[in-house]
Amino acid sequence: MESLSVFDIFKIGVGPSSSHTLGPWRAALDFLKKMESHTTGIVTLQVELYGSLSKTGRGHGTSIAIMMGLLGHDPVTVDTTKINEYVEDLQERKQIKINNYESFFNPDSDIIFLPDSLPHHPNAMRCKMTDQEGSVMEQVYYSIGGGFIEIEGEDQSAETTVSLPYPIETASELLKYCTENNKAISDIVFANELTFRTEEEIRNQLSVIHKSILQSVYRGCHATGTLPGGLNVKRRAKEIALRLLPSLRETDNMIEWLAEIKNTDPSFNTINKWISCFALAVNEENAAFGRVVTSPTNGAAGVIPAVLLFYICFCDEEVDRAIERFFYVSGEIGSLFKKGATISAAMGGCQAEIGVSSAMAAAALTEIQGGTPEQVLMAAEIAMEHHLGMTCDPIGGLVQIPCIERNAMGAIKAITASNIALSSTASHAIVSLDAVIKTM
């Protein structure tokens, strides 16, 4: 059984796509590490893209991600404002430094877009190199959604299989543990997380994820201009935020800014606009090669932040402990979908991204608002039920239209699903979460 941590679902990375940008970036970093085991210079280096990576790779910046990976930059820590500078320098110099050797690499001819697909997964890439001694190395990678990669020929099961106190493959198993131990879902998930990390490490990493989410919202609500890619999509989040909060200034502190939002008109219409604004802000950042948190993917990165900030800004409950529980629950629901279906839009359509993120958010919001484990799973099922069959149909291969707006719609659906579940008797539900995952 695959053992996933909350931090496998929530990963800090660079947009616009976890499958087409973050995954290939990580694959290129892995191949760079493999090349560094060769003690001589590299004579030839090529990367071939197949299937969906080829067909929509230009719009998703796949070639940029590969260049950044081969240059050795980490998507978690790289200065995103310098990505264009790094890429332009490589395109001009056509040199990559490996083991102190300057190796020739021309992105225009050595990143090759091929129309065919490889059988295992539509997001495939093959890296090939020849060193000065004539030794050839070749590796196939699959970007399987959410920034996860599979390396052909390598058994990675040992890395993802540990002995958990509560091994979970299905929602029914999760509910069984809650019932038998009289615990909330977040308690069960936290116990499993302690297998991977200490309590201090868990809380520190959750704080990093939470801070990164807030920063992506804040940056998106302060940025103007046109998104890259050629569609000339104008950023809207700042304009919406300014209408809702006229006192917004470029120099505002993020914490003070959130406090101002909490003190705004609490009418339904205002809150609804803020939820959309939060979601749009994150995915505009994502589309502009900004740093976001996969939730569970880059294309769906705005749903979780929008629902979390809805709770922080407009619900009266104590938030500190609730935020941790929010991540535990939403992360576990994302894991159930990854194990039982997919979180890759190339495999499962947009239901695998927005649908899953909406289910994650609905479940988490339900628990922190006092829902029972049964109601939590019911909320996740309701949210996904109304995303089933949603296709991945981005215009021009860009994660912009309709992807950015879909995050706002997914956030609203999550909140609605949570409200319905909290107002319902979960035992009366006709469709289970496991059934909707199987249907997906």
Image: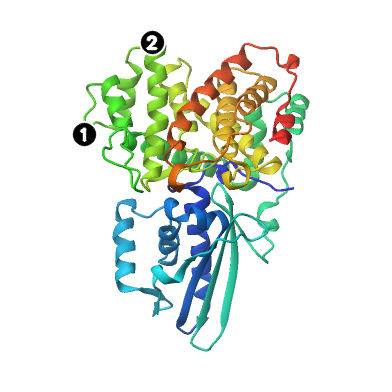
Q: Is residue 117 above or below residue 147?
A: below
Residue 187 at what x, y percent from top left? 64, 30
Residue at figure coordinates x 21%, y 34% from the top left: 251
| Alpha carbon distance from label 1 to label 2 | 27 Å
Q: Mark 1 = which residue?
A: 251
Is label 2 in a helix, a strand or a loop?
loop
Seen from the viewer's position, the closer of residues 200 and 38 is: 38
Residue 219 image label: none
Instruction: Residue 428: name its quadrant.
Output: top right
Q: Amino acid at mark 1?
A: Thr
Residue at figure coordinates x 34%, y 62% from the top left: 87
Residue 264 at what x, y percent from top left? 32, 15
Seen from the viewer's position, the closer of residues 405 and 81 is: 405
Residue at figure coordinates x 35%, y 43% from the top left: 231
Residue 16 at what x, y percent from top left? 43, 47
Would residue 172 appear left or right of 220 to someone viewing this image?
Answer: right
Q: Mark 2 = which residue?
A: 267
Residue 76 at what x, y percent from top left? 43, 52
